[in-house]
Image: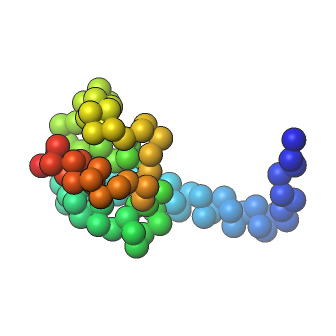
Amino acid sequence: MPQPPVLTPEQRQQALAKAAEARRARAELKEKLKMGSITLPELLARSGDDDHVGKMKVLAVIEALPGVGKVKARRTMEEIGIADTRRVRGLGEQQRKALVAAFS
């Protein structure tokens, strides 16, 4: 089994800070989706430029939409043919169109 990289305490702190920033940014984006200040098409358009958006799981994004719960999100993803583990950046053009059509 490979060993984890040996990090200095400073490198470890930097990595922890970077991870915390990424979690905060993703939570903020989900909150904006929930409040309606950003739409699903706008978020999908940002996925190419913004690493935080691109690395979000599609399931988490859909569940953050107003009026969509866990069951509806999973059912819609299954109908479209999107895996539960798929990230936003990994969506194909047809999958993006189908998501926007399903939630508009």
Asked whether residue 35 appears in the rendered view, the answer is no
Q: Is residue 29 left or right of residue 38?
A: right
Residue 98 picture location, percent across and down = 21, 48
For this orientation, the residue located farthest to the left is 104
**Residue 48 picture quarter:** bottom left
At 18% from the left and 37% from the top, the residue drawn is 67
| Residue lying furthest bottom | 49
Q: Is residue 2 left or right of residue 83?
A: right
Q: Would you say residue 83 is visible in this rendering?
A: yes
> Vertically, is 45 above or below 72?
below
Locate residue 97, reporting x and y percent: 22, 54
In which quadrant of the rendered image does the N terminus lie?
A: top right
- Image quadrant where residue 65 sits: top left
Q: Residue at x 85, y 65 (%)?
A: 8
Q: Tell me if residue 28 comes above or below residue 58 in the rendering.
A: below
Q: Position of residue 20 (x, y in %)?
A: 56, 57
Colouring mode (rainbow / by chain / secondary structure / one colour): rainbow
